[in-house]
Amino acid sequence: MGHPAHYHNFKIPIKLLLEKGHEVKVVARAKDVLFDLLSAEKWDIEKLTARKSRHKVGLVASVAGREAKIFKICKKWKPDLLAGTDLVITHVGKLLGVPSVVVNEDDSNAVPLMARLAFPYATAILAPNCCDQHPSNHKKIGYESYQELCYLHPDYFEPNRNLLPKEIETSGKYFVLRFASLHAHHDGGKAGITDELALQIIDILEPHGKVFITSERPFSNGLEKHRLHVHPADMHQVLAFASMYIGDSQTMAAEAAVLGVPSVRFNDFVGELSYLEELENRYKLTRGIKPDRPGELIELISKWVEQPNIVDEWKIRRSVLFENTISPAPFWVEVFEKLSVKPR
């Protein structure tokens, strides 16, 4: 695991694997609130320190360091399968003769390093049917669903107002804004919501309810009063009861969509990620707008906030989503079992 989203993706599959009698070792590197999330689990966890660098030399050194550490862990622990989102598992797996499964939801064009440096060495790529894993589609094991439903499917997630922080419990109607850091290797040059645009959005929303901001980056004092203080483990409860989500994080836009919350994402990835395009065009659960069209974002938010019964309409659209998708967590477990050194 190298990101908080990976914890959410894997927590139910890990639970299911452990219940079936398998052993699981989690290797995680420091990123945002990942270690905070892991602190609640009684898993066998190896924590790695993360080297922060946006330069190519630093990235190479970081990858090489992780490869050495994970190679050492695997030599000692002797796993039957390596699964995750880090390219190093494919290299270590190849060296040790251990099957590796890359779990991915991005199209190859959006993650060129993974496509070039991980896919050729992976045993399999576990991805939604809509995702293009070119030139390694022959390795893809597809499924009709999305990673976010690994942990937000009704089989495993139940909205509970008692888990909302007090500031939200007493707020009535509210809206969630999200600012991503946009510093990952695949985020290079990507733009999102500026502080100035955020203030315009807040002016539109505040007459209708409170505005809360969750952010991976610092922002101006004018926005600080809207910062949401919530334990990372409870963020999905906050999202589930929101009247609208606006942000430059594609993951949270997808989470809002599968929860039936009207969501709009504003970043340069719009049009590049098949799973979000499917959630938008097939299920009408989210909208994507490029950063060079802020006027369109303001117009859409103004329209949605005045639209009566919009949340009920999204619930209907969400029910259509569940008619056409599976709960992916049990499917992932089935794949892991079949591909392991000792298939079960």
Image (tube, rainbow, N blue to C red):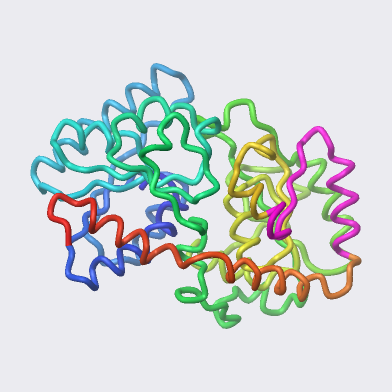
Image height check: is 158 above or below 201?
below
Q: How many marks?
A: 0
Q: Nearer the viewer, residue 105 or 305?
A: 105
Q: Is residue 53 left or right of residue 282?
A: left
The quadrant where residue 10 appears:
bottom left
Residue shown at the point (23%, 68%) measured from the top left:
18
Q: Is residue 111 left or right of residue 223?
A: left
281 in magenta: yes
Magenta stretch, residue numbers: 280-305
Residue shown at the point (69%, 34%) measured from the top left:
268
Q: Position of residue 218 (x, y in %)?
A: 63, 43
Q: Is residue 157 left or right of residue 101?
A: right
Q: Position of residue 258 (x, y in %)?
A: 61, 64
Residue shown at the point (34%, 28%) measured from the top left:
62
Q: Nearer the viewer, residue 158 or 49?
A: 158
Q: Position of residue 325 (x, y in %)?
A: 53, 64
Image height check: is 1 above or below 113?
below
Quadrant of the snapshot with the C terminus: bottom left
Q: Is residue 14 left or right of residue 33?
A: left
Q: Looking at the image, which residue sits at the far top? A: 57
Residue shown at the point (24%, 55%) measured from the top left:
45
Q: Position of residue 228 (x, y in %)?
A: 64, 61
252 in magenta: no
The quadrant where residue 168 appears:
bottom right
Image height check: is 196 above or below 58?
below
